[in-house]
Image (cartoon, helix red, strand yellow):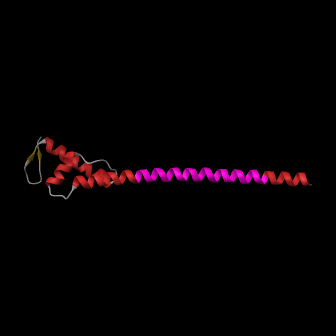
Amino acid sequence: MPQVGPNGEVQPATDKYHERLQQLERIVEGKGITRPKSPNTLIQQTQNGDEGPITKDFAENRLKKRVDANEEGIEKALDMLEKLARQLKNVESDFKDTKDRMVMIAC
């Protein structure tokens, strides 16, 4: 059965799928799930008069990669700090044990 558009026109099945794809792209973008836009989407945005959709998409992807790299760096730094804190705790514990032994030997 053919699909009827909002103005009463008959829509071919391919238009229905294309429209559904665009809806899904908007949903994915709205949830913060980023992936490069399809070339068709970028071309359509350019044809609709949007300013620099390709440049904007490239800048967004580059920014996301920078944020991801920063998050990885922060995670590594936090791991190193945790290891350092554990080592410091071990050194303090060993120092206390050594001090206690020295006190026992001195007595």
Residue at the far right in the pictured view: 107
Residue 5 on the magenta segment: no
Residue 84 in the figure: left or right of residue 31: right
**Dominant secondary-structure state across the stretch colored magenta:** helix
Q: Position of residue 68 (x, y in %)?
A: 41, 51
Q: Position of residue 53 (x, y in %)?
A: 22, 54
Residue at image coords 46%, 50%: 72
Magenta region, residue range:
67-96
Question: On the picture, is 91 further left or further right than 42?
Answer: right
Quarter occupied by the C terminus: bottom right
Taking the magenta stretch, the answer to whether it contains residue 92 is: yes
Q: Residue at x 58, y 53 (%)?
A: 81
Residue 4: percent from left, percent from top: 11, 48
Residue depicted at x 61% and y 50%:
83
The quarter of the picture where the N terminus appears is top left
**Residue closer to the observer: 6 or 81:** 81
Residue at x-position 52% and y-position 50%:
76
Q: Residue furthest left?
A: 9
Q: Position of residue 9 (x, y in %)?
A: 7, 49
Number of marks: 0
